[in-house]
Amino acid sequence: MALPESGSRCRLLLWPRLVLFGDSITEYSFQENGWGTFLAERLLRRCDVLNRGFSGYNSRWAKLLLPRLIAAGAGAESTAAVTLFFGANDSALEELNPKQHVPLEEYAANLKSMVHYLSSVGITEDRVLLITPPPLGEAAWEKACLAKGERLNRRNATTGEYAQACVQVARACGTDVLDLWTLMQKEQDFSSYLSDGLHLSAEGSRFVAAQLWARLGEKLSALPSLVPYWRDVDHMDPEATLL
């Protein structure tokens, strides 16, 4: 059977996409048992899940990078939802980690700027979800810092201020928000959610995935499967079904 020629009745199939934009917590989400892999599995044949996580990045750098990842036109039109997951690096203590630190007011302004940019290219606020940084396990993260010859460069209380700012930006911009910093601390001991005090453990990833699915699942799982189930393909005339 010959392949259809260019310019025939074939039409390029473009799946809607969910863009996960964030720092290392997003980058690592495609590792085994990661929250990104959970979403990708749930959305198979309905929506492509794109990992756009960049380890070590803060909101200042993310704001500059976003227009290179999502632009007006087909990229924006096919985007079903975007998650913005920054703050774990922004909230680093300035005196100990000036490269990653971003002042609180600038962090909030950067989040607003990214939401407004997405709106300007056609991704409305109802398709954007902000995620606060998770709480910081200071004892475990201090151990990780000391192993690198550094002092503890983050504090949970400071991270909480950035989480609160993220929630306030979401309210002001009209987007949904997942407040991990608050939700994870409803348990007395949240250390099981973290692998090293900063990044998520397998249990933490399951928690994030469940919370995200509660907010995005109904909308995204309603997307149609673009290619017929194999039992629905006319094996006598597959072109009639697939083209």
Image (cartoon, rainbow, N blue to C red):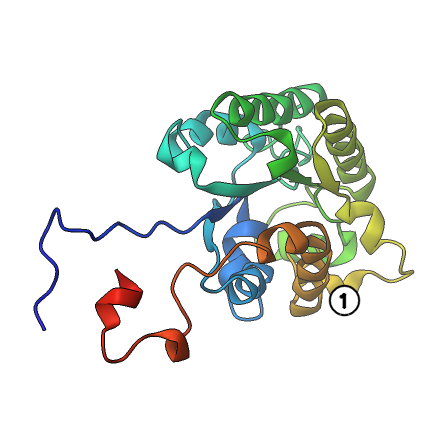
At 80% across and 38% down in the image, what residue appears? 160
Residue 192: percent from the left, percent from the top? 76, 67
Q: Quadrant of residue 213?
A: bottom right
Q: How many marks?
A: 1
Depth check: 92 or 236 in front? 236
Left or right, 206 with respect to 38, comes to right
Residue type at mark 1: give it. Answer: Ser
As rendered, which of 104 and 209 lies closer to the eye? 209
Residue appearing at x 25%, y 50% in the figure: 11
Which quarter of the rendered picture does the C terminus lie within?
A: bottom left
Is residue 34 toward the left or the right of residue 203 in the image? left
The residue that mark 1 highlights is 192
Residue 12's x, y, as percent? 27, 50
Q: Is residue 198 visible?
A: no
Residue 140, percent across and down?
73, 59
Taking depth in this image into account, of 100 and 225 the one nearest to the observer is: 225
> Residue drawn at (39%, 29%), measured in percent from left and top?
71
Q: Position of residue 48 (x, y in %)?
A: 44, 54
* In the displayed structure image, the side of residue 235 where residue 20 appears, left or right: right
Check the image and report above or below for 103 versus 5: above
| Residue 132 vs residue 170, the one in the foreground | 170
Q: Residue at x 47, y 51 (%)?
A: 51
The quadrant of the image that shows the N terminus is: bottom left
Query: Few, some or many C-alpha atoms within 10 Å of disc 1 (few <14, some 14-19, many ≥20)?
Result: some
